[in-house]
Image (cartoon, coloured by chain):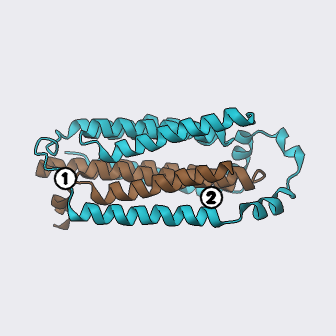
Chain colours: A brown, B cyan
Amino acid sequence: MMFEHVLFLSAYLFSIGIYGLITSRSMVRALMCLELILNSVNINLVTFSDLFDNRQLKGDIFSIFVIAIAAAEAAIGLAIVSSIYRNRKSTRINQSNLLNK
Amino acid sequence: MDLTGPIHDILVVFLGSALILGSLGVVLFTNPIYSAFSLGLVLVCISLFYILLNSYFVAAAQLLIYVGAINVLIIFAVMFMKGSEYSNDFYLWTVGDGVTSLVCTSILFLLITTISDTSWYGIIWTTKSNHIIEQDLISNVQQIGIHLSTDFFLPFELISIILLVALIGAITMARQ
């Protein structure tokens, strides 16, 4: 009964992350909500790894890889946002079509 | 951790409420600095959750990488962009916001209903019978080290290549 509450928390973080990602007007806030989504998936993986898989810990190792990928993606995303800001002087999402050219 | 019942439950309730308030703060604060610090609170609470779930290495990795590197990077980026969006503050609740909140609430209720209706105790009972007691001689961190260097060695090396490519790409994008 206890671990179901952890799964409820993960589902709540996921839906809040999706809401923030869709309705954010700034690109940095969208990246922050993307990190929320990835963390909710990580909580799910680690919960099930603790519950079912004490021998091989597959969920733990996969969540380590998810953390590494999220770090790489946050670095590249913020580099893109900073170069768009340098060219456009604004971080509104509807003005971020600079990569079209 | 093998904590006794009430302490475990109190910690879960405390961390869960901090998580709920922090994630609302990430989305709803208009000042982006407050939003970034709320994200830091959420990431620290998630790391403490991992300690409660017996995954000590993932908790340390979360604290070092997410809070120590990614959150600091986000705060640098927020401070670097002079926030023009909280000076022209037309934070009206548009139609798109309402539709999205409806869709996200329905996703949340769908997930909660699915989690509540799944019979977890049948799955737990069939997998707990395979556990052997002697695996407690090797701690969790040692087991992760063993599996990363034997079973999951190829993804480990590929992750290092991905991180190298991401580093070069980020420096190239943010230069000049």
Give residue B34's quadrant in the image: top left
Q: Nearer the viewer, residue A5 or A84?
A: A5
Task: Find residue B154 and name its label.
Answer: 2
Indicate left or right for B90 with B22 as reference.
Answer: left
Q: Residue at x 89, y 46 (%)?
A: B133
Q: On screen, B91 above or below B14? A: below
User: Can residue B50 be seen?
Assistant: yes
Q: Position of residue B19 (x, y in %)?
A: 48, 41
The label nearer to you, 2 versus 1, is 1
Q: How many residues crowd around disc 2 within 10 Å: few (fewer than 14), some, or many (20 or more)?
A: few
Q: Amino acid at mark 1?
A: Ile
Separation of marks 2 and 1 at Cα, in angstroms: 36 Å
Q: Position of residue B160 (x, y in %)?
A: 52, 50
Q: How many residues crowd around disc 1 within 10 Å: few (fewer than 14), some, or many (20 or more)?
A: many
Task: Find residue A22 and name its label.
Answer: none
Q: Position of residue B16 (x, y in %)?
A: 53, 41
| Residue identifier under label 1 | A84
Q: On screen, B80 above or below A84? A: above
Q: Residue at x 57, y 39 (%)?
A: B13
Q: Nearer the viewer, residue A88 or B45?
A: B45
Image quarter in which the N terminus of chain B is found: top right
Q: Amino acid at mark 2?
A: Leu
Q: Secondary structure at mark 1?
A: helix
Q: Nearer the viewer, residue B101 or A82?
A: B101
Q: Position of residue A2 (x, y in %)?
A: 67, 48
Image quarter in which the C terminus of chain B is found: top left
Indicate left or right for B73 with B7 as reference.
Answer: left
User: Can residue B162 be seen?
Assistant: no
Indicate left or right for B159 with A48 as reference.
Answer: left
Which chain is home to disc 2?
A: B
Q: Residue at x 28, y 42 (%)?
A: B29
